[in-house]
């Protein structure tokens, strides 16, 4: 289970990446025991935050939120998108690994994508309190540690020299940014066809 490595990735990442490397890092294993559960955390937190906490505007004292139906729809789409994003990123990593791996060309891309996404999923819990500055700070911290785990874990998990590992990790970051921009574009498309937020006022 992913919980077996959670503490280690934050306290001793080098040793934890070595331990992860020794496991059977199959796509089925990660998508049956890891990703569906950890990816649910930010989606559930966001649903609570946007329906029960809401956010206020200016000095009017009015607290706005999303309707439960609208929030459920958007959070479900967000959940599906994040799970698919980890899978697609993992397959891209496997594809790129052909260029960088010499000794052990085992597919471990989904494992790398799964474990480096943990800080982002945990940071997503901040959506339970939908304050813009609070969420931005937590998201930046999560992103910074995710990038650190990526650069630290790529040469270990993929068993390649550190120089190649740095270039490999940089390629992964580039792909991640492209995927993020693509997700934003898809979001705009969904909003344009009517799958957008519906607001209500909290007492």
Image (spheres, rainbow, N blue to C red):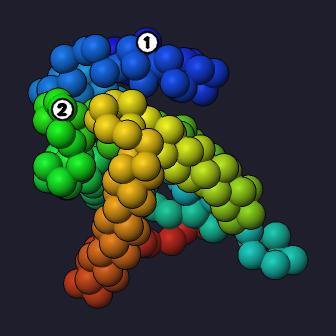
Mark 2 crowd level (few <14, some 14–19, many ≥20, 10 Å Cα): few
Mark 1 crowd level (few <14, some 14–19, many ≥20, 10 Å Cα): few
| Numbered mark located on residue 78 in the image | none
If you read the primary sequence from the N terminus, does the residue marked by circle 2 or circle 1 appear first? 1
Q: Nearer the viewer, residue 191 or 26?
A: 26
- Rendered location of residue 43, percent (x, y): 42, 46
- Rendered location of residue 202, percent (x, y): 65, 60
Above or below, comparing residue 27 to residue 49 in the picture = above
Residue 194 in view: no
78 displayed left or right of 132: left
* Distance Cα–Cα, label 2 vs label 1: 27 Å
Nearer the camera: disc 2 or disc 1: 2
- Rendered location of residue 197, percent (x, y): 42, 72
Q: Nearer the viewer, residue 56 or 93?
A: 93
Residue 28 in view: yes
Residue at the (39%, 57%) spot, across then down:
167
Find the residue positioned furthest to the right: 59
Above or below, comparing residue 35 to residue 117 in the picture = above
| Numbered mark located on residue 103 in the image | 2
Residue at the (18%, 39%) spot, across then down:
102
Q: Quadrant of the C terminus?
A: bottom right
Q: Quadrant of the N terminus?
A: top left
Residue at the (37%, 75%) spot, across then down:
181
Instruction: Please name the residue that numbered disc 1 is placed on.
Output: 4
- Rendered location of residue 82, percent (x, y): 32, 51
Q: Nearer the viewer, residue 133 or 119?
A: 119
């Amino acid at each position: 289970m992913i919980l077996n490595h959670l503490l280690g990735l934050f306290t001793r990442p080098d040793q934890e990446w070595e331990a992860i490397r020794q496991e059977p890092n199959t796509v089925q294993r990660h998508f049956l025991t890891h990703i569906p559960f950890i990816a649910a955390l930010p989606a559930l937190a966001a649903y609570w935050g946007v329906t029960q906490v809401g956010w206020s505007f200016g000095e009017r004292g009015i607290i706005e939120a999303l309707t439960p139906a609208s929030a459920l729809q958007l959070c479900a789409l967000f959940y599906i998108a994040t799970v698919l994003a980890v899978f697609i990123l993992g397959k891209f990593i496997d594809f790129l690994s052909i260029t960088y791996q010499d000794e052990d060309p085992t597919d471990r891309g989904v494992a790398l994508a799964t474990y480096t996404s943990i800080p982002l999923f945990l940071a997503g819990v901040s959506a339970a309190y939908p304050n813009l500055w609070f969420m931005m700070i937590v998201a930046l911290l999560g992103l910074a540690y995710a990038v650190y785990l990526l650069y630290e874990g790529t040469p270990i998990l993929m068993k390649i020299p550190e120089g190649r590992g740095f270039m490999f990790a940089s390629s992964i970051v580039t792909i991640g940014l492209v995927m993020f921009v693509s997700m934003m574009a898809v979001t705009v498309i969904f909003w344009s066809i009517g799958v957008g937020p519906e607001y209500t006022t909290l007492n």
